[in-house]
Image: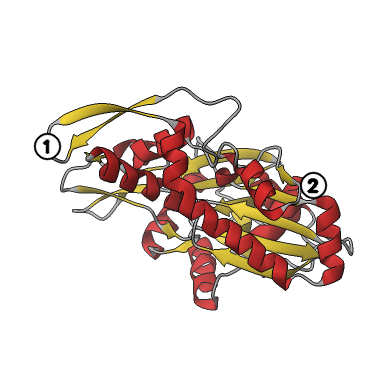
Amino acid sequence: MGLFNFFTQDVAIDLGTANTLIIHNDQVVVDEPSIVAIDRTTNKIVAVGKRAMMMDGKTHENLKTVRPLKDGVIADFNAAEGMIKEMIKLIYPKKPLFPPSWRMVVCIPSSITEVEKRAVRDSADQSGAKEVYMIYEPMAAALGIGIDVEEPTGNMVIDIGGGTTGISVISLSGIVCDESIRIAGDEFTADIIEAMRRYHSLMIGERTAEQIKIAVGSALKHLENPPDDVAVNGRDLVTGIPKQIMVSYQEVADALDKSIFKIEEGILKALEKTPPELASDIYRRGLYLTGGGSLLRGLDKRISQKIKLPVHIAEDPLRSVVRGTGMALKHIGKYPFLMQ
């Protein structure tokens, strides 16, 4: 515990399926993959974030890598608690004389259950939090984009994260209607792994599929500025020998087609549930895309063609949620939607 309130420090945490980001003193101080490496014999965490990611898929029998979050919620409580503790330690590389108490704002998916909410709170408490507040991801994303959430105006925010895609209509500091689907970045990665297996008889790992998604990932089969084909290494399923193939963006677009179609269907469902007055606001303002998935080439154009509305990508989509969480933390008394 810290010494009086002088030693209470504020942190905003975006606890994501793919990445965890932490803001402290208005700066993003931690931006690491949400993964831990655990020693099976001692059950201790040996690495978190980037170091653990480098070990993923390359461990021996005494070591395992764990992703504590699945579909936006905590799947492994102990690993999540350990990961938060270790990542908070990264804020102060040198151990302070008086360890501070933390006041945390953690963002959570809007579709979260009470049990899942309790798991987030308990993990934060166990990692040394004195006070824990929670904010729904769509509200945090809207704040991070620069939307005035208190206005009586409808805004649709689509947050495509690692585990879930949250589609929300926000007005008057609240979520009016909400559609959450468990199709997002992780599903795109799984689609690429399956496409390599089916069309090339090539077995690849998650990290390789993620690299393909970044290098040549596309939502459209025809791009104005197409990326160059990428070399992919893996294991031949027929011979068992490692081999290399070249993969184009059209192949990846074909592999991702069904998942993107499901996101489009989710957006249409959310629009169907939207009250008419807010629907007219959305018609004028368009849709806002945030989250790492929104960086997929041509995704904004594809959604715009399907929905027949303008689609805007946030300026820094990977960090808009954590920036919004940081803003909520700064004005903690101002926003009624913060849950304690």
Secondary structure, mark 2, is loop
Name the residue that disc number 2 marks. Answer: 146
Image quarter of residue 150: bottom right
* Residue appearing at x 58%, y 52% in the figure: 160
For label 1, the crowd category at 10 Å Cα-Cα, with few meaning under 14, some 14 to 19 and many 20 or more, is: few
Label 2 – label 1 distance at C-alpha: 52 Å
Secondary structure, mark 1, is loop
Up-down: is 52 above or below 245?
A: below
Q: Which residue lies furthest to the left in this view?
A: 239
In the image: residue 121, left or right of residue 78: right
* Residue appearing at x 43%, y 39% in the figure: 252
In the image: residue 151, left or right of residue 229: right
Identify the disc placed on residue 240.
1
Could you say where residue 192 lies in the image, as x and y percent from the top left? 37, 44
Q: Residue furthest right?
A: 152
Total numbered circles: 2
Front-lying residue, 205 or 49:
205
Q: Is residue 134 visible?
A: no
Could you say where residue 147 lies in the image, as x and y percent from the top left? 81, 51
